[in-house]
């Protein structure tokens, strides 16, 4: 028998509250939004036009099981099917977005295409 969705979310919130290592922005909407706005103003956080260069392929994009528990168990609606945590700007970002701090996971800091900056 499957666990009802609301019960599952409730359990995740309980577990997230117990995770001291959850970054504050995953648990506090105001902090998350302030950091998101900084990413917009300082690094042009925006929708990506490239499959290869987006948050989902960035080395700063944290989708570890622990982080997803913090995000999904926290109070913030990401509005994205594949949310993750940006370790560069410290906010919950969306896999299909990008910013000028994008870095390849293999360590090659491929520059973001000029027309996208
Ligand atoms: S550094 Fe930029 S591209 Fe990388 S995860 Fe953060 S917002 Fe997305």
Image (cartoon, helix red, strand yellow):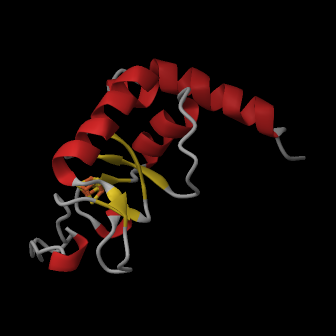
Query: Looking at the picture, does residue 86 appear above or below residue 36?
Result: below
Query: Looking at the picture, does residue 30 appear above or below residue 113?
Result: above
Name which quarter of the figure residue 44 lies in.
bottom left
- Kindly tell me whether residue 113 is visible in this rendering: no
Residue 43 vs residue 32: left or right?
A: left
Residue that appears at 84% across and 38% down: 4
Q: Nearer the viewer, residue 58 or 21?
A: 58
Name which quarter of the figure residue 38 lies in.
top left
Residue that appears at 33% across and 68% down: 54
Residue that appears at 24% across and 73% down: 116
How many numbered circles does the render carry?
A: 0
Residue 82's spot in the image, x, y percent? 52, 58
Query: Looking at the picture, does residue 93 appear above or below residue 105?
Result: above
Residue 80's spot in the image, x, y percent? 55, 53
Residue 43's spot in the image, x, y percent? 19, 52
- Kindly tell me whether residue 97 is visible in this rendering: yes
Residue 109's spot in the image, x, y percent? 9, 72
Residue 102 vs residue 84: left or right?
A: left
Q: Quadrant of ligand 1?
A: bottom left
Name which quarter of the figure residue 42 lies in.
top left
Which residue is situated farthest in the right direction here? Answer: 1
Residue that appears at 29% across and 74% down: 53
Q: In which quadrant is the C terminus drawn?
A: bottom left
């Amino acid at each position: 028998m499957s666990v009802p969705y609301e019960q599952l979310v409730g359990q995740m919130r309980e577990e997230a509250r117990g995770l001291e290592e959850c970054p504050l922005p995953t648990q506090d909407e105001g902090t998350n939004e302030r950091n998101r706005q900084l990413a917009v103003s300082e690094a042009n956080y925006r929708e990506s036009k490239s499959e290869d260069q987006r948050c989902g392929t960035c080395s700063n994009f944290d989708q570890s099981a622990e982080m997803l528990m913090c995000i999904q168990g926290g109070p913030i609606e990401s509005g994205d099917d594949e949310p993750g945590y940006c370790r560069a700007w410290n906010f919950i970002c969306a896999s299909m977005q990008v910013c000028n701090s994008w870095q390849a996971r293999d360590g090659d800091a491929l520059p973001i295409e000029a027309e996208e900056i």
